[in-house]
Image (spheres, helix red, strand yellow):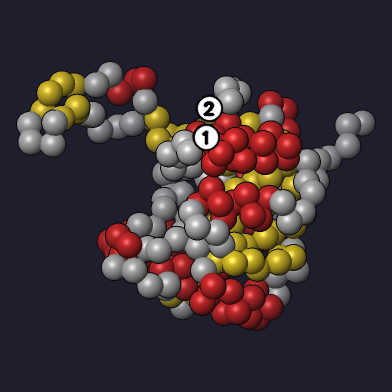
């Protein structure tokens, strides 16, 4: 029988939260629990995940470490200080440990399900790289910021979520190269795509939203209460 891969979940949580006015978005309470607590709890319960590493803002490290202890999260092996940018933060966490597969999940996506996490990890173990994605339902327009210049074929586009899962050496090398080359990447998949290496898509979940604005807090609270 094929040996089950060792999986480490990386949770980057060092962002500035500028679109929420700054501050510690990741610790904002939703239904009584800090935002990051939900994704950490799901990763703890996910049978495919063996270890969790959190990378946070300097001022949040001790608070998040205390939260993990208080929640009894046994898979959390480290809470690190983040880097200058998201790619720096993720790479800093990646070199902290060895793993066959890394599952990189936004700390600001509290509605992750264990089922989706396991599905993306399984796909990455089979292909080397996998992300959850959703087809578009809205019409997509091209603009020059003032007027519409065209209508895009939305069947050619998807939105992607996290966890984004990759074979260990692949994602380390991809992020290191992207940083050396100064690529303007906004997610980890982009670094792998730039190699180039094929990234496979697993059907995502509508509930797996990223909390970016204060309105998103209301939506997430509703999903989490269902």
Residue at position x 57%, y 45% from top? 163
Q: Quadrant of the C terminus?
A: bottom left
* Number of the front mark, 2 or 1: 1
Q: Is residue 136 left or right of residue 120?
A: left
Q: Residues within 10 Å of mark 2 (few under 14, many from 20)?
A: some
Residue at position x 68%, y 78% from top? 69
Q: Is residue 60 left or right of residue 28?
A: right
Q: Earlier in the sequence, mark 2 or mark 1?
A: 1
Compared to residue 159, the image places residue 89 above or below, namely below
Q: Nearer the viewer, residue 88 or 159?
A: 88
Marking on residue 49: none
Compared to residue 170, the image places residue 46 above or below, namely below
Residue 83 found in image quarter: bottom right
Q: Which residue is mark 1?
A: 181
Q: Are marks 2 and 1 in contact (CB under 8 Å)?
A: yes
Rendered location of residue 43, percent (x, y): 64, 57
Q: Quadrant of the N terminus?
A: top right
Q: Is residue 224 visible?
A: yes
Callout 2: helix, strand or loop?
A: loop
Q: Which residue is mark 2?
A: 194
């Amino acid at each position: 029988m094929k040996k089950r891969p060792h999986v480490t979940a990386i949770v980057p949580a060092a962002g500035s939260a500028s679109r929420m006015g700054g501050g510690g978005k990741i610790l904002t309470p939703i239904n009584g629990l800090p935002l990051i607590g939900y994704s950490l709890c799901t990763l703890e319960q996910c049978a495919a995940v063996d270890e969790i590493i959190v990378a946070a803002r300097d001022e949040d490290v001790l608070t998040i470490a205390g939260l993990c202890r208080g929640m009894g999260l046994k898979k959390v092996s480290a809470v690190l200080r983040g880097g200058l940018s998201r790619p720096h933060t993720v790479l800093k966490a990646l070199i902290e440990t060895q793993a066959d597969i890394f599952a990189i999940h936004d700390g600001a996506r509290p509605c992750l399900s264990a089922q989706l996490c396991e599905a993306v990890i399984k796909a990455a173990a089979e292909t080397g790289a996998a992300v959850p994605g959703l087809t578009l339902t809205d019409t997509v327009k091209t603009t020059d910021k003032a007027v519409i210049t065209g209508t895009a074929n939305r069947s050619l586009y998807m939105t992607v979520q996290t966890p984004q899962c990759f074979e260990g050496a692949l994602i380390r090398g991809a992020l290191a190269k992207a940083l050396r080359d100064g690529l303007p990447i906004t997610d980890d998949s982009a670094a792998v795509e730039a190699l180039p290496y094929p990234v496979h898509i697993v059907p995502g979940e509508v509930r797996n939203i990223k909390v970016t604005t204060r309105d998103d807090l209301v939506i997430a609270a509703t999903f989490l209460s269902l």
